Amino acid sequence: MRALLTLCYGAICYVVFFLTFLYAIGFVGDVLLPKTVSQPLSAGPATAAMWVVDLVLLGIFAVQHSGMARRGFKTWLTRLLPPAIERSTFVLLSSLALILLFWQWRPLPGTVWNVTGGWGEWLLYALSAFGWLLVLSGTFVINHFDLFGLRQVWLSARGQPCAPLQFKQHFYYRIVRHPLMLGFIIAFWATPHMSTGHLLFAAASTGYILIAVKYLEERDLIVAHGEDYRRYQGEVPMLCPWPRPHHEVAKPSPRRMAH
């Protein structure tokens, strides 16, 4: 019974995540939904309270997402919950933080740019779609089911240990170290209608991604993978897929990274 409950919990958390992800595409892309990042509920100038609410919502997600991803918090959480559902719980609470943001977001009136008609509009929509596709496909390049907690609950239900995945450098990860984050940045900025609210969302989210990846996630990855990841840092850029100057490439480690 416990194994079945664990498996059901993981499946429910995944469904919540997947529906939230689909909603995020419409919300950020300003398509199909009655309320999006750019569509105000009522006319009128933006108030200070609207800016504060949006910034607080973005901050709630940033604190939850970064805080729960740290090793210390994971260790504390697994003292309260079975280790098999730690990742699923992280996925669930991240999804709920986003749902709160979608629900309470205050779209800010005003337009930064508006591209209508012609190839320019369709190019920006296509670029946004590419960003979302990069995010989703990138999860499968590493391990989609481990990333969202399904692998852990499945192995637990079968009574098998869940060994950490090996660090691998393949496909997108040979071009940039964080292709999922690159996909999000592309999706957030590639829009034919950049409203003031969308600009706030894109700028704050991009700033959060840059800080979290460079100062939090990269440090955790060095702790987890040691010299292999340091070598990887020297060989592959973090987010911008341009070639590194020769003098920036670190010397290879005597240990080979798994492929």
Image (cartoon, rainbow, N blue to C red):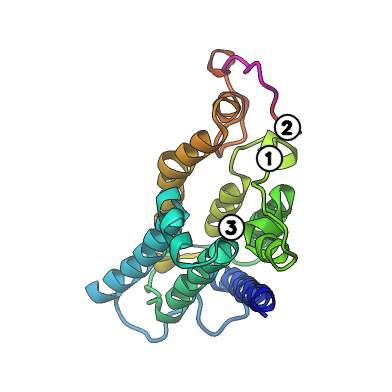
Q: Neighbour class for label 1 at 10 Å: few (<14), some, many (≥20)?
A: few
Snapshot quadrant of residue 14: bottom right
Residue at disc 1, secondary structure: loop
Name the N-terminal-most of marks 1 and 2.
Answer: 1
| Residue 258: image tag | 2
The CA distance from mark 1 to mark 2 is 7 Å
- Residue that mark 3 sits on: 187
In the image shown, does 245 or 218 lie closer to the viewer?
A: 218
Three-letter residue code for mark 1: Gln
Of the residues tagged 3 and 2, which is closer to the observer? 2
Furthest-left residue in view? 48
Q: Is residue 259 visible?
A: yes
Task: Name which residue lies at 37% across and 60% down.
Answer: 63
Snapshot quadrant of residue 254: top right
Q: Which residues are magenta?
A: 250-256
66 up-or-down from 170: above or below: below
